[in-house]
Structures are given as structure tokens and as C-alpha cells.
Image (cartoon, grey):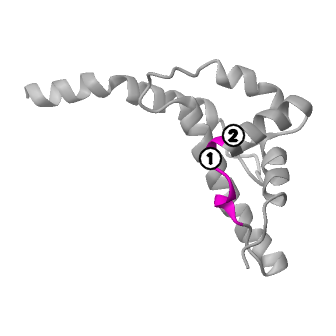
Amino acid sequence: MKRIKKFYLDNLLKIVFIFLLIFFTFNLKAEDDYVMYGAVTNSCSEMDNLLSYYIEEDPITIKDYVIATFQGYLSGLNFYINELTGKYKRLNEYSAEYMFEYVKVYCKNNSNETFADALTDFILSLPDIK
């Protein structure tokens, strides 16, 4: 019993953080139709607000979550590009940190766009896999 209690206390911050991310990210209504949803649909103007939740000491930071979300979106987009062109983009051409910084710079210069727009711009800049 003591080990279970210690586990929950040690992981309470993680549990609360993940719950809050899910709660605020997936604010969907059943009657709405979505082409895409989640963090990638956020406006570029929200980047600073999103990063204000960054706490480096967290086991899973907001930045880690956003990078993972971006990577998932890029993977799906890469399959679509392959359907159109017969070629895949080399997603590991740059580091995940580079990709994140690319999106930040894009958003700084295009605040009315979405993260999805920034990621589309990013993937189109990548070389094809030969």
C-alpha cells in the first residue's frame, strides 16, 4: 500500500499535467465536423501563451508535448505527400529541436496562420527520400 501511495504522489504532477493538456487541447463538440484537430490547429499567435506553461523541471514539458504532436502531424502529412507525389520527405533531415524553432520563427512572422501552416511549410522545405 505504501508503494502505491508513493507512486501516486510521485506521479501526481504528471497526471495533472496530462489531464490539463487533454482537457484544453481536445475541446471538441460532437455536432462539429473537423478536418483536423488538436494542438496543430492552434493559431501562431498562441505560441507565446503556450510556451508560458513551459517548466524545464517537469518530466514531460509542454514543449515535449508540442514537439510530439508536431511530429505526429508531420508523419501523417508525409503519407499524404507520398500519395500525391509517390515520394516521402526525409523527416529526420533536422532535429526535433530545429523543427520546433522553425515553427516558432514561422509563427513570429505569420501570427494569423496556424501551427499546421507552419508545419506544412516546414515539410515542403525537406528533401525527398530517394
**Residue tagged 1:** 96
Residue at left offset 47%, top offset 27%? 17
Mark 1 element type:
helix
User: Which quarter of the rendering shows the N terminus?
Assistant: top left
Which percent across, then down, holds residue 64?
54, 37
x, y (%) of residue 36?
74, 51
Residue at (59, 20) in percent of width and height: 53
Q: Label 1 near label 2: C-beta < 8 Å?
A: yes
Q: Point out the residue furthest to the left here.
A: 1
22 with respect to 2 (left or right): right
Relative to 117, 25 lies left or right: left
Helix, strand or loop at disc 2? helix
Vertical placement of 55 versus 126: above or below?
Answer: above
Give how far apart the Cα atoms at labels 2 and 1 are.
6 Å
- Was residue 94 drawn as part of the magenta stretch in this picture? yes
> Which residue bears the numbered disc 2?
100
Q: Is residue 69 left or right of residue 113?
A: left
Taking the spot 46% from the left edge, 33% from the top edge, the residue there is: 60
Q: Amino acid at mark 2?
A: Phe
Decide whether the magenta segment is chiefly helix, strand or loop: helix
Bounds of the magenta segment = 90-97
Q: In the rendered view of the protein, which quadrant contains the C terminus? A: bottom right
Counting other residues with Cα less than 10 Å from the Cα at mark 1, is it few (<14), some (14-19), or many (20 or more)?
some
Picture layout, residue 120 above or below residue 22: below
Percent position (x, y) of residue 121?
A: 85, 51
The amino acid type found where label 1 is placed reads Ala
125 left or right of 10 in image: right
